[in-house]
Amino acid sequence: MLTAETIIQSLASGLLMGLLYGLIAVGLALIFGLMDVVNFAHGEFLMIAMYATFFLFAFFAIDPLLSAPLVAATLFVFGAVVYLLIVRFAVRAKANAGMVQIFSTFGLAIVMRGLAQYFFTPDYRSINTSWLGGKTISIGGIFLPEPQLVGALVSIAAFAGLYFFIHRTDFGRALEATREDAGAVALVGIDKNRVFALGWGLGAALVGLAGAIMAIFFYIYPDVGASFALIAYVTVALGGFGSVFGAFAGGIIVGLVEATTALILPPSLKSVGIYAVYLLVVFIRPRGLFGSM
Amino acid sequence: MTITRRNVLLGATAAAALAPIAARAQTKEVVIGVIYPLSGSSAQIGVDAQKAFETAADIINKNHDFKLPLAQGEGLPGLGGAKIRLVFADHQADPQKGRAEAERLITQEKVCAIIGTYQSAVAVTVSQICERYQIPFLSADNSSPSLHRRGLKYYFRAAPHDEMFSKAMFDFFDAVKKKGAKIETLSLFHEDTIFGTDSANAQTMFAKERGYKIVADIKYRANSPSLSAEVQQLKAANADVLMPSSYTTDGILLVKTMAELGYKPNAIVAQDAGFSEKALYDAVGDKLEGVISRGSFSLDLAEKRPMVGLINDMYRQRSGKDFNDYSSRQFMGLIVMADAINRAKSTDGEKIREALVATDMPGNATIMPWKRVKFDEMGQNNDADPVLLQYLGGKFVTIFPLDVAVSEAVWPMK
C-alpha cells in the first residue's frame, strides 16, 4: 500500500503540520532563550488564542484570517501582563528558583483551564464557515488543505520576520544582549524588566498567531492546548533550547517524523517516532540540534 | 454504681443531643455516587451527564405522573420516602483518578451505590474498588464487552455492550446486502483505549464470521493533534463501509481531515460515542448527511410512548439539549439503581446487590427501546436491544431493526 502517492501525501501533510508546530513552539523557545524559564502554560496561551478567534468570529463575524493580527496583539498584552504579574516575582525566589518558576506557570495553566471551563463551558466549539475552512487544493492527487497551507506560509513569514527583528532592530539587539548577560545590560541603561516583558509579549503573540490559524481547522475546548504543548516542548528540546531557528527546524522534523512513522508503524505509535528521534538527538547532541551552551 | 442527679442530667443532655440524629435517620436520604469526567477533555459529557442524573433524581424525589418506576409519589417508598441525594465526583477520564474518587465516595461520602463513568477504561478501576467495598456499581453508559466478563459480583449494566451493538450493525449489513447493495470491505478506525479496542475486536469477530473483509484496521491515539496520516490510509483502502469508534474530539478531526484530504466514504457506520454528540454535528454535520450510528435511544420513541417526550423536555430545560444516546442511558442508570434500592428497603451493599439481581423491569416502563431490564449472572442485561440511527436532514431517525424503524435507510450515504 506504500505507493509514491501515499508517501508524497504523507510528507506534504507532515511538512505543513510541522511548520505549524514550529510556529506554536517558537514562543516557548524565545522565552526560554531570554530568561531560562519554561512556560508550562504555553498550551493554555494557545487555547486562549483559539477562543479569542472563535469569539471574534461568533460575535463580530470577523474571519480568522482578519482577526489573526488582532488575536496576536491581544496575546502580546496578555503575555506581557503574565510576566509583570507572575513570572517577574517567580524569578526573584532566592531558593529553589527553578521549582518556583515551574509551579507558577504550571499553576497558571491549571487556573486558565479552569476559568475557561467555567466561563466558556466545556463544549467543543469550532468555526464552520470561514474563508478557508474545509477548502483544499489538489495537485496531481496530492491534497493540500488551504488552512494548513496558509498556516505554513504564516509560519515561514513569522520566522523570517522574527529573524529580521532579532538581528536588525535595536530592541532585537537588546533582547539578545539581555539574554547574554542580564546584569551587564542594566549597566548600560537597559531596563531588563521591560525587555523581559516585551519578550513574553512577543512569545505569546507568536503562539496567538498560531492559535488563530488553528481555530480554522481544529476544534476548540478548554484542554485543547495540552496535546499541542507536549509537541511544542519536544520541538524546542529537539531544535535546541532557546534557539529560534531550532524551533523552526524542530517543528519541521517533528511534523515529518510523525507523518513517516505513521506510514511504517501503526498510527497509534506515531508519537513514539518523535520521541525516538529526540532520544537519538539527546544521545548525539544533548543541547538540541541548534542549541548553544 | 449509684445514679446521681448529675448522671441523669448528663444522660438527658446526651439523649437530647442525639435526638435530631435519630430523627434524621428515620427520614434518611439515600446517597448515590455519580462519577464522570467533569473536567478535562471530555468534561462536556460529564456536565451533560450531571443534568441527566439530576433529571432522574427530580423524577424520583418529586411526584410525577409517568409510568416509570418511582416516578409517582415522593422519594423511595421502600425506605419510608427517603430522598435520593447525588454526590458527583470528577475522574477527568483518568482511570487512576477514578479509582481514588470511587474510594473517596465510598469511605467519606458513604454512598451506597456508584454509577458511571462514560469512559470504559475508568469503569474498570471504579468497579474494582466497588467490588472490594461490596458496593454495587452500575455502568450507565460504558459499552466495552469485557467489563461484565471479569467475574465481579457487584457489577451491573442495563444497557447494551459493543458486541450487541456491533452485531446489530452486521445484521443491518446483511439486510442491506440482501437488497442488492454492495458491501464487501470494511475499514475500522478506533482509538487506543479499552473502548476502541473492544469495539474493534467485536467488529473483527463479526466480520470474520459473516464473510466481510477488513481492508484497513487503524488504531490511533486519542486526542491526536493530527489525523492526516490515518485518514490517508483509510482513503487508500477505500472500503465500502467506514466504521469509526471515536470520542467527540477525534470524531470532529476525523471528519474535517477526511474532507481536507478529499476522502468521501461510501458509508459510515459509527460505534456511537462522538457520533451521537451534538457538538460533532454542530461542527461538521454538513459533511455527515446519511451517517449511521448505533444507539440505544431514539427520540422517535416519543411518538409511541409520550412520557419519553415529556421527560426529554425536563432534561432540555436543564441542559439545553435533547436526550442523546448517552444522557438517556445515564438517566435510566439512576432509575434502575434507585428501583433496586427501593426494593432492597436498605442501603446495605449486599441487599442492594440482591435486589439488582432480582430486577425485572418491563421495557415500556423505561424511556428506551429495550425489551426489559433483567441482569444475567454476569450483571449484563441481554434484553437491551440496540438500534441503528441515521442522520438525515439534521436529525436522527431509527432505521434498524426493521420492526422499530421509522424510515428506510439511505444507502450509500450522500
Image (tube, coloured by chain):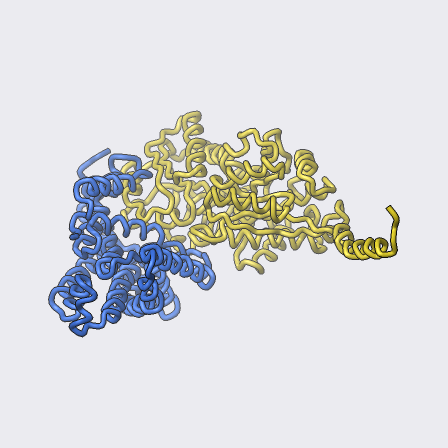
Q: What residue sits 68% from the left and 39% below the top?
A: B352
Q: Which chain is blue?
A: A
- Quarter of the image where one finds residue B217: top left
Q: Is B73 placed above or below B340 here?
A: below
State the image coordinates of residue A198 (x, y, percent, origin top left): 25, 69
Q: Which chain is yellow?
A: B
Residue sticking out furthest to the bottom: A189
Give left or right: position of B43 versus A70.
right
Q: Is residue B178 visible?
A: no
State the image coordinates of residue A147 (x, y, percent, origin top left): 26, 56
Q: Nearer the viewer, residue B280 or B109?
A: B109
Q: What residue sits 59% from the left and 35% below the top?
A: B131
Q: Is residue B12 visible?
A: yes
State the image coordinates of residue B207 (x, y, percent, origin top left): 41, 29
Q: Nearer the viewer, residue B294 or B59?
A: B59
Q: What residue sits 58% from the left and 34% below the top?
A: B380
Q: Is B281 placed above or below A165 here?
A: above
State the image coordinates of residue A241 (x, y, percent, origin top left): 22, 53
Give left or right: position of B257 versus B81.
left
